[in-house]
Image (cartoon, rainbow, N blue to C red):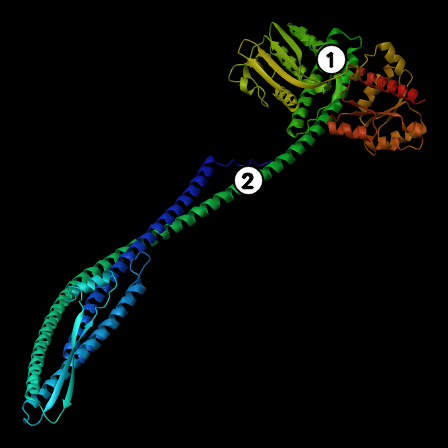
């Protein structure tokens, strides 16, 4: 027994979708949090960097001021300690500039800033040199004054002509470039507020001309120059002293300002350090939380992936189970089809005897009671045959092996045959059967005549079965379409018990039966008839519907497309009359091969009744031996026989050395009704097939038709 595959719960699909959505959502959340954390880190770094740069720039400002003040003190005092202090401050400024982190957002050009500081160093050195030269000249002037004082205290006879030339030299102020922000800050801290004017430098050039005589006027002039120079020196000393005091005051003031700035800087730096520490701690907590969250999210994502992969694996396994189940079901269906085919063969074989002998008995002059019993046997056997046919047809379309013939036939003739057959059943039940067919008798079409007949018989039979009183009506018409095609539209209308709305949607389902209908007829059936009709119609491109209401009857309608042919394409089977049949089969010699003695007895009874000679063989080898030594008009052979089966016998006959005997008519008597079996028989060399169970008329007409066709073919060849 096949284990049924489990259906995948819809909850599993919903869970997979939810897990995948959670996976992508978690990934997106982590990505956004990571981007925000990176942005926060960058902003914090920029804030810290900007604050550090501000502190470094402030350091540069007071270092520049200190260096400038030390350089001025050096020019006044000549103390090299101030020179070393100024040089050290300028070097620290350059080192501090290198520490400043200039980013893309900064306006200041770092190279230009450094270049300005270097220019200041050069200008300061030049100023110191100029100041030293000025002091040197003033000192030389003091020496000249000392010389004049010595001349003034000398003896009168010593005469010296002293000429002093005073030149005035103007030094133009240095042209300064437009200062940037740092230049303006440095200038604001300088002691000079106004722009530097042109400087006037007085240079005294002394020329002493010695002569043997010195006049009093010359000596008096020297005294005057001496006094003037003395006043200049005194004023210069006062100026230097005042400048020194101012610079000292400025230096003290700068030291006080720097000390205050350092104090404030210390407070600010402490606050900044505290803020940095707190910020780093908070940032560390944030990143720690982020790391923990990322770890938890990563674990959740791993679990989600595991769940997804597990569900995918479960789905894969379930699909594999479904595939295995499908393969097993297919194999099971094939085995079931073979089983049903075998069962059909095994059931049809004894039914052949039951139906055949009941038919023979019904033709005898029997008492009424015995005739009634024989009729009951025949009806029961026909019901069994219909049941077997339904099960076999169901097995065919279940395994996809339902094939359809494509042969020409007269459409109106099929409907008339169904009407004639079903009229007897309607009369027995006491209801009417009407044929309201509006189809031309000359319409020839191409299709499966037997399947169409099966559908009509089934629908009409059901209508009669479920109609207690009233009538059943068959309505049929054709509707032309494009080309040579048309659609056959058939309606079977009854006045029966009808179908309630709850059962109406399931009428064409397999094994579906209406309980009320079964009670009314006291016959349950298989529940396959309408399902088989639906498959036959739909597999040929048609459609079938039903409209009904409880107690108001039913209307079964179907539409089926056909291809229309010319009248000459249809072969109308001739209905042999008794005299013609007797003339065609009289004194014919037939070889009968069958291993079932009951079937042999039935066949011999029928053949003997029609004056047909018969030799019997119970296996294929025995039949072949009889064929070799005797001449026969026809071979009737069963397919499944011991020693040599019917197909092997046919092959041996078709390859017989005598070409005339090899063309003998061979008809297969078989209970195998599958189309593929029939095709194999015809391909092997069988001329026609007689299905078991068969009736007397069917067998004799088949024999007569084959003999007549063979005679016509021989005349045509001759």
State if disc 2 and disc 1 touch (CB < 8 Å). Answer: no
- Which residue is found at the position 16% from the left and 86% from the top? 207
Is residue 564 at least partly visible in the picture? yes
Q: Which of the two labelled residues, at mark 1 and mark 2, occupies the earlier sequence position?
A: 2
- For disc 2, the neighbor class at 10 Å (few under 14, some 14 to 19, many from 20) is some
Q: Residue 466's x, y, as percent?
A: 60, 11
Q: Give the SS element for disc 2.
A: helix
- Residue depicted at x 21% and y 60%: 272
Dot 1: what SS? loop
The quarter of the image holding the N terminus is top right
Residue in the foreground of this view, choosing between 419 and 369: 419
Q: Position of residue 642 (x, y in %)?
A: 81, 33
User: Which label is found at residue 698?
Assistant: none
Whether residue 703 sits left or right of residue 86 in the image: it is right
User: In the drawing, does residue 582 fall left or right of residue 290?
Assistant: right
For label 2, the residue is 319
How packed is label 1: few (under 14 Cα within 10 Å), some, or many (20 or more)? some
Left or right: residue 23 versus residue 702 is left
The quarter of the rendered structure image containing the C terminus is top right
Q: Which is in the foreground here, disc 1 or disc 2?
A: 1
Residue at screen point 92% across, 23% down: 717
Residue placed most toward the observer, 304 or 134: 134
Name the spot of residue 307 as percent of width and height, x first: 45, 45
Q: Which residue carries the number 1 mark?
A: 443
Place residue 443 in its image quadrant.
Answer: top right
Residue 25 point in image, percent of width and height = 39, 44
Separation of residues labelled 1 and 2 (CA atoms): 52 Å
Q: Quadrant of residue 284?
A: bottom left
Q: Nearer the viewer, residue 35 or 661?
A: 35
Left/right placement of residue 231 relative to residue 690 reads: left
């Amino acid at each position: 027994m096949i284990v049924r595959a489990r259906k995948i719960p819809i909850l599993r699909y919903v869970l997979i979708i939810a897990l995948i959505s959670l996976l992508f959502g978690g990934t997106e959340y982590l990505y956004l949090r990571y981007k925000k954390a990176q942005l926060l880190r960058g902003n914090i770094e920029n804030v810290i960097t900007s604050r550090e740069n501000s502190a470094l720039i402030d350091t540069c400002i007071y270092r520049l001021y200190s260096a400038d003040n030390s350089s001025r003190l050096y020019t006044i005092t000549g103390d090299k300690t101030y020179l070393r202090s100024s040089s050290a401050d300028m070097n620290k400024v350059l080192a501090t500039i290198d520490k400043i982190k200039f980013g893309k957002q900064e306006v200041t050009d770092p190279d230009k800033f450094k270049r300005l500081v270097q220019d200041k160093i050069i200008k300061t050195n030049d100023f110191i040199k100029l100041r030293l030269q000025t002091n040197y000249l003033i000192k030389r002037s003091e020496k000249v004054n000392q010389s004049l004082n010595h001349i003034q205290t000398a003896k009168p006879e010593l005469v010296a002509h002293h000429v002093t030339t005073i030149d005035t030299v103007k030094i133009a102020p240095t042209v300064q470039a437009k200062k940037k922000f740092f230049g303006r800050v440095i200038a604001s801290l300088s002691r000079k507020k106004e722009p530097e004017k042109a400087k006037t430098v007085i240079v005294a050039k002394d020329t002493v001309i010695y002569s043997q005589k010195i006049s009093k006027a010359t000596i008096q002039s020297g005294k005057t120059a001496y006094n003037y120079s003395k006043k200049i020196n005194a004023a210069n000393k006062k100026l230097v002293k005042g400048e020194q005091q101012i610079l000292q005051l400025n230096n003290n003031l700068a030291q006080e300002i720097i000390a205050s700035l350092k104090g404030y800087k210390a407070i600010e730096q402490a606050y900044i350090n505290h803020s940095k520490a707190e910020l780093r701690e908070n940032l560390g907590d944030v990143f720690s939380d982020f790391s923990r969250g990322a770890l938890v999210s990563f674990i959740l994502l791993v679990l989600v992936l595991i769940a997804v992969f597990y569900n995918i694996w479960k789905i894969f396994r379930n699909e594999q189970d479904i595939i295995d189940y499908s393969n097993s079901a297919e194999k099971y269906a094939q085995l079931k089809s073979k089983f049903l085919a075998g069962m059909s063969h095994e059931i049809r074989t004894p039914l052949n005897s039951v139906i055949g002998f009941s038919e023979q008995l019904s033709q005898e002059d029997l008492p009424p009671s015995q005739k009634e019993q024989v009729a009951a046997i025949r009806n029961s056997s026909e019901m069994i045959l219909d049941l077997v046919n339904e099960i076999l047809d169901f097995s065919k379309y279940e395994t996809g092996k339902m094939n359809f013939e494509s042969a020409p036939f007269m459409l109106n003739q099929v409907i008339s045959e169904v009407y004639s057959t079903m009229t007897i059943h309607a009369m027995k039940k006491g209801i009417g059967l009407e044929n309201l067919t509006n189809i031309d008798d000359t319409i020839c079409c191409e299709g499966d005549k037997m399947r169409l007949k099966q559908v009509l018989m089934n629908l009409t039979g059901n209508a009669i079965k479920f109609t207690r009183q009233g009538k059943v009506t068959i309505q049929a018409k054709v509707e032309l379409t494009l080309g040579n095609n048309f659609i056959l539209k058939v309606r079977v209308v009854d006045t029966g018990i009808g179908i309630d709305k709850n059962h109406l949607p399931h009428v064409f389902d397999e094994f579906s039966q209406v309980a009320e209908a079964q009670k009314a007829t006291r016959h349950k059936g298989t529940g396959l008839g309408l399902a088989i009709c639906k498959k036959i119609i739909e597999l040929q491109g048609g459609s079938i519907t039903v409209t009904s209401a409880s107690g108001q009857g039913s209307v079964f309608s179907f539409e089926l497309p056909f291809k229309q042919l010319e009248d000459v394409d249809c072969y109308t089977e001739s209905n042999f009359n008794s005299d013609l049949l007797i003339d065609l089969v009289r004194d014919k010699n037939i070889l009968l091969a069958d291993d079932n003695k009951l079937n042999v007895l039935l066949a011999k009874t029928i053949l003997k009744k029609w004056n047909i000679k018969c030799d019997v063989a119970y296996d294929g080898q025995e039949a072949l031996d009889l064929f070799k030594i005797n001449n026969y008009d026809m071979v009737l052979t069963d397919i499944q026989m011991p020693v040599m089966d019917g197909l092997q016998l046919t092959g041996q006959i078709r390859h017989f050395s005598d070409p005339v005997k090899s063309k003998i008519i061979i008809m297969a008597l078989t209970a195998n009704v599958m189309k593929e079996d029939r095709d194999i028989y015809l391909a092997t060399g069988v001329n026609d097939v007689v299905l078991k169970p068969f009736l007397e008329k069917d067998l004799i007409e088949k024999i007569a038709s084959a003999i007549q066709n063979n005679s016509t073919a021989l005349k045509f060849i001759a």
